[in-house]
């Protein structure tokens, strides 16, 4: 089998982005989606729901055969943040099993439905060897965005960033050739999502051949509401719209909610890395203080 012209001519000097498609596989569209991606020299991460994977195992294998990466998107797509730890575990574990049954490999990546997350969910995912992946850019395809709007959203992607799309929409399928052309014009390539960093990297997991970002940013922290067991903080970033803020908790503390940003976590759960998600340069989070009211430390770098 020969490579497509797009794949042969790829110049990835500006780095890699993560194309992601949620809620598959679907008998009505997944095969068309895979064909369009292959024809345009693109690889993507498919965040499958477990029930769809269980009911369409041949399509899961087709995703794998097409060179796509496969992630866990829960079994029934519920609001996991409203569920108990054991219910969450069932949702994630059954999806792991369904995908492993189809492909021989259990996923390493997990996308929570609706992008909703909390400490309990992250803990269960971590126990199952899963890295939580949100997104930097929302294509809004689920919200009726046109093909042109989806292409425009993908045009905002920068090195390492991830876009949310879905398996089942014709508008999303029709956007693929233009997304591919836009990435090529900007010397960006579709990469894999690293289970260790949660960012898009070269398909072999290697380092991205880019110049380091320049510039600087500052992060200012202000108080929000507080209760007996927890408090809210808000962080405002200035100096750059391409920021990465590191929030380091104190030993007794944990973060139970975040908003207006795209968080990832280190293995200890005590260091949160927040990136923009299209909601501007201010984000917030809730700290369960565990008796220590001292604010976490924040630092900013340009990414």
Image: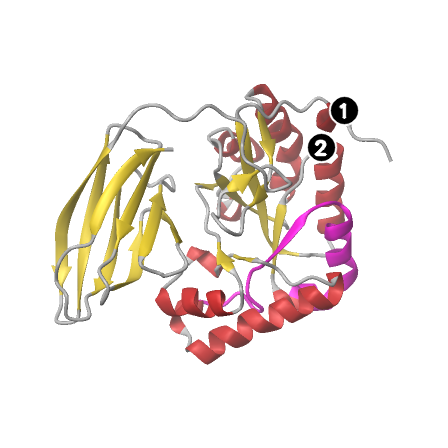
Verify whether residue 59 appears in magenta: yes
Q: Secondary structure at mark 1?
A: helix
Q: Is residue 251 left or right of residue 135?
A: left
Neighbor class of circle 2 (other Cα within 10 Å; few <14, some 14-19, many 20+) is: many
Which residue occupies the extreme top position in the image?
185
- Residue at 48% across, 60% down: 112
- Residue at 76% across, 41% down: 35
Residue 269: tell me if it is visible: yes
Vertical order, 253 against 263 (above or below): below
Q: Provide residue 122's location: percent of width, then percent of height.
A: 42, 64
- Residue at 58% across, 34% down: 147
Vertical order, 116 against 15 (above or below): below
Residue beneath disc 2: 41
Verify whether residue 26 appears in magenta: no
Query: What stretch of residues is rendered in magenta?
Result: 52-79
| Quadrant (top left/top right/bottom left/bottom right) for the N terminus | top right
The numbered mark at residue 229 is: none
Q: Earlier in the sequence, mark 2 or mark 1?
A: 1
The numbered mark at residue 5 is: 1
Q: Provide residue 19's location: percent of width, then percent of height.
A: 58, 41
Which residue occupies the extreme right position in the image?
1
Q: Are marks 2 and 1 in contact (CB under 8 Å)?
A: yes
Vertical order, 152 against 118 (above or below): above
């Amino acid at each position: 089998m020969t490579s497509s012209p797009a794949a042969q001519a790829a110049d990835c000097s500006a780095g890699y982005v993560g194309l992601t498609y949620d809620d598959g596989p679907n008998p009505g569209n997944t095969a068309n989606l895979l064909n369009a991606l292959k024809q345009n020299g693109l690889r993507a991460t498919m965040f499958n729901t477990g029930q769809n994977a269980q009911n369409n195992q041949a399509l899961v294998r087709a995703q794998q055969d097409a060179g796509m990466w496969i992630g866990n998107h829960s079994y029934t797509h519920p609001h996991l943040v409203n569920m108990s730890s054991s219910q969450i575990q069932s949702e994630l574990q059954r999806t792991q099993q369904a995908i492993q049954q189809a492909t021989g490999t259990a996923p390493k990546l997990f996308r929570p439905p609706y992008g909703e997350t909390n400490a309990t969910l992250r803990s269960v995912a971590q126990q199952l060897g899963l890295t939580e992946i949100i997104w930097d850019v929302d294509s809004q395809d689920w919200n009726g965005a046109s093909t042109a709007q989806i292409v425009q959203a993908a045009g905002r992607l920068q090195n390492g960033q991830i876009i949310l799309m879905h398996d089942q929409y014709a508008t999303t399928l029709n956007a693929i050739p233009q997304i591919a052309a836009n990435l090529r014009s900007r010397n960006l390539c579709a990469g894999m999502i690293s289970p260790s960093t949660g960012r898009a990297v070269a398909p072999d997991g290697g380092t991205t051949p880019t110049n380091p970002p320049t510039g600087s940013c500052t992060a200012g922290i202000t108080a929000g509401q507080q209760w007996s067991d927890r408090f809210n903080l808000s962080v405002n970033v200035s100096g750059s719209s391409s920021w990465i803020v590191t929030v380091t908790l104190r030993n007794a503390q944990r973060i139970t909610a975040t908003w207006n940003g795209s968080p990832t976590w280190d293995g200890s759960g005590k260091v949160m890395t927040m990136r923009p998600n299209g909601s501007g340069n201010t984000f917030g989070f809730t700290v369960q203080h565990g008796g220590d009211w001292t604010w976490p430390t924040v630092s900013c770098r340009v990414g």
